[in-house]
Image (cartoon, rainbow, N blue to C red):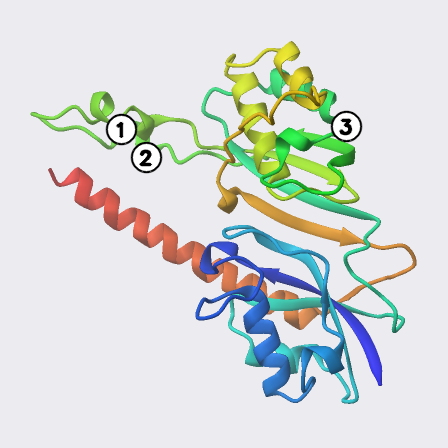
Amino acid sequence: MKRRAFKVGYIGSNFYGFQRQPHLRTVEGEIIDTLIDIGYMDSLENGRFRIAGRTDAGVSSLGNVISFQSEEEIHINKINSQLPDDVQFLAEAPVRFGFKPRYAKERWYRYILFNNNLDIDKLNQVAQLFIGTHNFTNFTKRYQKTTVRTINKINISVPKIQPDERLNNAYITNDFDFNQEYPNLNDNYSPIFVDVYGESFLWNMIRKMMRVFLEYSEGKLNLEDVNNLLNPDENKPREHIRVLNGENLILMDTVYDNIKFTYDDYAVEKFKRYLASQLVYHQKSYAIIESILNSF
């Protein structure tokens, strides 16, 4: 009987979240069904199937971790050949039988904001307030035994990606001013990466954090407001912070002490090819909608 852990990549917008649910397509459901179908497990109990975390609907991953044990010789590409293209095993590592993937040393999440005149200096300024140990009770969707969490590091970067300048000159008609009616058409949608590192996170915590980052950058909150959210008065009810979109969040990696994952070159290349095909699909869809819009 061998026990192994695997890093899993998936596109969250294609699923109703990670956790299996009756009659809904989920990441966990696809993985479990595939492992049972190919004979690597006969049940969750016997396979001791465990996961690092259940990402919300819309959230993608390059580094969520699952583990299970099997009497069969496990081949990562045999699993991938039976999985749908939008969820694939990317790396593997042998682990001890008592290994529980939810006890990670560190998790790395990336949230992608879009540079619609956001103040990068203010984003960096507010990020500094979140680093360290805080009571994040205002940043979770539900009550939990403890809401104290530690954020090790937050990096904010602007990748060198040129925005699509076709938007700037596309919408010209005689009778209808698209720029006036739909001002967001000409916004700058170049991405801003907010990379957050910590041992563990509460449900919706990062998406609520990003709402605060956004509103501070836009001048809707000041530093005192943010400090009050991070140092809540126990006698007051929790603040309601609306979450930002799950589709902008990616679980980039999960790290453990003394466990070294080996990436499978073929598995990685296969997933990259799938992602490239999806990029082409969305570029074609963009061009079609743009053509229809310009036809008025």
Check whether the beta carbons of the residues at disc 3 and disc 2 lie within 8 A of each other. no
Residue position marked by numbered label 3 in the rendering: 134
Check whether the beta carbons of the residues at disc 1 and disc 2 lie within 8 A of each other. yes
- Residue 254 in the image: state x and y as whole percent: 75, 53
Q: In what element is the residue under mark 3?
A: strand
Residue position marked by numbered label 2 in the rendering: 166
Could one spot residue 158 in this view of the protein? no
Q: Nearer the viewer, residue 287 or 85?
A: 85
Q: Is residue 19 above or below residue 153?
A: below
- Residue 241 in the image: state x and y as whole percent: 54, 29
Q: Type of residue at label 2?
A: Arg
Q: Type of residue at label 3?
A: His
Residue at image x 77%, y 34%? 148
Using a 10 Å C-alpha cutoff, classify the residue at mark 2 as few (fewer than 14 neighbours), some (14 to 19) or many (20 or more). few
Q: CA distance from mark 3 to mark 2?
A: 44 Å
Q: In what element is the residue under mark 2?
A: helix
Residue position marked by numbered label 1 in the rendering: 169
For residue 94, side relative to residue 284 (left or right): right
Q: Nearer the viewer, residue 38 or 294?
A: 38
Residue 23 sits in which quadrant? bottom left
Could one spot residue 108 in this view of the protein? yes
Residue at image x 24%, y 46%? 289
- Residue 22 in the image: state x and y as whole percent: 48, 70
Q: CA distance from mark 3 to mark 1?
A: 47 Å
- Residue 134 in the image: state x and y as whole percent: 77, 28
